[in-house]
Amino acid sequence: MHEADEPKQIRVFVVDDHIVVRRGLQLFFGMLDDIEVVGEAVDGQHAIEVLAARAADDDLPDVVLMDLEMPRMDGITATGLIKKAHPGVEVVALTGFSEAERVHLALEVGAAGYLLKDADADEVGVAVRAAYRGEIHLDAAVVGKLTRSLRQPVENAAVLTPREREILALVALGQSNRDIARSLVISERTTRTHVSNILAKLGLVSRTQAALWAIREGLAPGP
């Protein structure tokens, strides 16, 4: 997560086994002033290897666009390994599949967002910028299915304090910790603590899951 002002260019790494997709994304981002493609991989295993080499050179990307269905190592497995090895790198899942279970798996291992491959090019840019800022971006076409099928946490909203419910609603609106801190006139550290407590109390593993849960429970409006 990056909560400072955005840099001149956000560094993106593309992982997809289809060269047409990789070249298409490179062409699209090549037309933008604030996003650049700094590397690519043909499958999850290749991505793990390239990112490990980049980490040794202190040259990691800011955001990885990750296809979920690939040979050798799928995107879900790769996403989990990347988030464990390089927690500062955000991952946005990009796939042609809309099954809720696959989306859940991607979010559970740390994906910051989810896009279908038929999304408009501009929406891909929006998702990359949101992930860089530590915000949430989900394809509107699958949010309804996600919120309906989200696995029921052990606890419910009654375990949250009024302040935690207020913060959870802002998380569901896609606000970063920095945005929430400004809105509520509290420190970013306090905000991070509240978000961590919310996840622990609800039995969730990511702020994206928390946002979906809040939408389903009526604590925040859906897209």
Image (cartoon, rainbow, N blue to C red):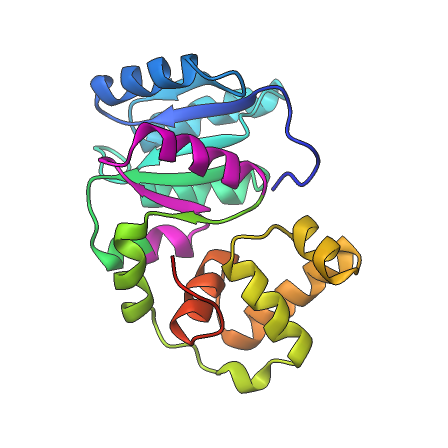
Residue at 49 percent of width and 65 percent of height: 210
Q: Is residue 11 above or below residue 88?
A: above
Q: Is residue 109 above or below residue 161?
A: above
Residue 206 versus residue 79: which sits nearer the camera? 206
Quadrant of the frame with the C terminus: bottom left
Residue 5 appearing in the image: yes
Residue at 76 percent of width and 56 percent of height: 189
Give the left or right position of residue 13, taking residue 157 as reference.
left
Snapshot quadrant of residue 71: top left
On the image, the x and y values in percent for residue 117 come to 24, 35
Give the left or right position of residue 97, taking residue 48 as reference.
left
Is 38 part of what is drawn in magenta?
A: no
On the image, the x and y values in percent for residue 202 come to 51, 75
Residue at 50 percent of width and 61 percent of height: 172
On the image, the x and y values in percent for residue 39 come to 43, 17
Magenta span covers which residues? 104-133
On the image, the x and y values in percent for residue 152 come to 37, 77
Snapshot quadrant of residue 40: top left
Residue 199 versus residue 53: which sits nearer the camera? 199
Is 105 part of what is drawn in magenta?
A: yes
Quadrant of the frame with the N terminus: top right
